[in-house]
Amino acid sequence: MGSVGILGANGRMGRALVTVAKEQALPLAAATVRLGSELAGLDAGELAGCGKTSVLLQQTTLAVIQQADIWIDFTMPEAMLQHLELAVQAKKAMVIGVTGLSDSQYAQVQAAAKLIPIVWAPNMSVGVNLLLHLVQTAAKVMGNSADIEIIEAHHRFKKDAPSGTAMAIGHQIAKTLGRDLADVAVYGREGITGERDQQTIGFATVRGGDIIGDHTALFADLGERLEITHKASSRTTFAQGAWRAALWLQNKQPGLYSMQQVLGLADLA
Ligand SMILES: NC(=O)C1=CN([C@@H]2O[C@H](COP(=O)(O)OP(=O)(O)OC[C@H]3O[C@@H](n4cnc5c(N)ncnc54)[C@H](OP(=O)(O)O)[C@@H]3O)[C@@H](O)[C@H]2O)C=CC1
Ligand SMILES: O=C(O)C1=N[C@H](C(=O)O)C[C@H](O)C1
């Protein structure tokens, strides 16, 4: 079994990833913290609150990146791109869950995927990846008469909006309907907005407390509405998905792979 390293092991997702590794005896070989972090040298499991793992936190250098075959990154866009550069130099695979990438940052991920195998997905849960299929059916049946809104809610600490998942849902629906999301997306409303243009896809963002991650795709027509909702109740679901992606990536050729491919949902009708 290939060995796996975790980047940003002190983050909310980093700790969840270490905990899942310990609980499921997964091949955790290394875990890192940011350069200069005082946490270097601590046990990754003790920091995560799941007990000793015998994996000590290290700063993220090229020498450390050599210590695992596949690296999981749930940090932030700029940090992730620095990690990606190291992974390309060391020819290591990456699972990337970071959201809020600009177009040019995403293009850098695409370029790196010509050299190393990468899974990038804004949401690693089974339920959201199934939802991405269900909304296609809903869009085909209702999308040309119903108003489409995507509503997401997350914890107060989240830095990007709308969530990466909400954007993926929007792109999926727009693609199904032959619309370009850049032309039809409406991000929030204020003032005298006028009547709603049926072609638009609206986004609404809620931030508060410790909400892990809720997403609803709403298809609202006259007389009825359909809501397809996913609610994550624990980060374990994302961490398990990321581990699944990491183990799936072993021995893969360079390329940019999706969570749909990892979960075997890519060919679902
Ligand atoms: N795809 C999916 O399924 C999911 C994706 N996410 C995404 O994952 C990302 C992380 O989320 P979350 O865990 O909540 O965030 P946190 O803020 O809890 O963790 C971010 C981690 O990144 C590290 N970091 C930040 N900046 C730097 C830097 N410049 N150099 C090195 N390390 C850095 C932080 O280090 P330090 O602790 O030292 O500050 C921390 O360990 C977000 O983009 C989020 O949207 C989240 C959940 C699921
Ligand atoms: O920041 C988070 O927490 C999450 N981010 C992802 C996103 O932006 O879609 C996925 C999940 O909902 C949790």
Image (cartoon, helix red, strand yellow):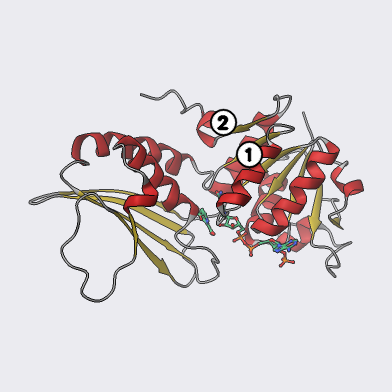
Q: Residue 9 lies in what quarter of the image?
A: bottom right
Q: Position of residue 50 (x, y in %)?
A: 71, 57
Residue 222 seen in the current view = yes
What's the amino acid at mark 2? Answer: Val
Q: Residue at x 19, y 41 (%)?
A: 144
Q: Position of residue 151 (x, y in %)?
A: 34, 58
Q: Position of residue 239 (x, y in %)?
A: 61, 47
Q: Is residue 159 above or below residue 176?
A: below
Question: Dot 2 corresponds to which residue?
Answer: 262
| Residue neighbourhood size for the residue with mark 2, other residues' Cα within 10 Å, grouped as few (<14), some (14–19), many (≥20) | some
- The one nearer the camera, 196 or 120, is 196
User: Looking at the image, is mark 2 or mark 1 nearer the viewer?
Assistant: 1
Q: CA distance from mark 2 to mark 1?
A: 18 Å
Query: Which residue does the image show at 50% across and 26% down from the upper left?
Result: 264
Q: How many marks?
A: 2
Q: Are marks 2 and 1 in contact (CB under 8 Å)?
A: no
Q: Residue furthest front?
A: 183
Label 2 or label 1, whichever comes before in sequence order: 1
- Report the quarter where the C terminus lies: top left
Q: Secondary structure at mark 2?
A: helix
What residue is rendered at 78% in x and 46% in y?
A: 85
Which residue is the extreme one toward the right?
63
Q: Quadrant of ligand 1?
A: bottom right
At which x and y percent is residue 119? 62, 37
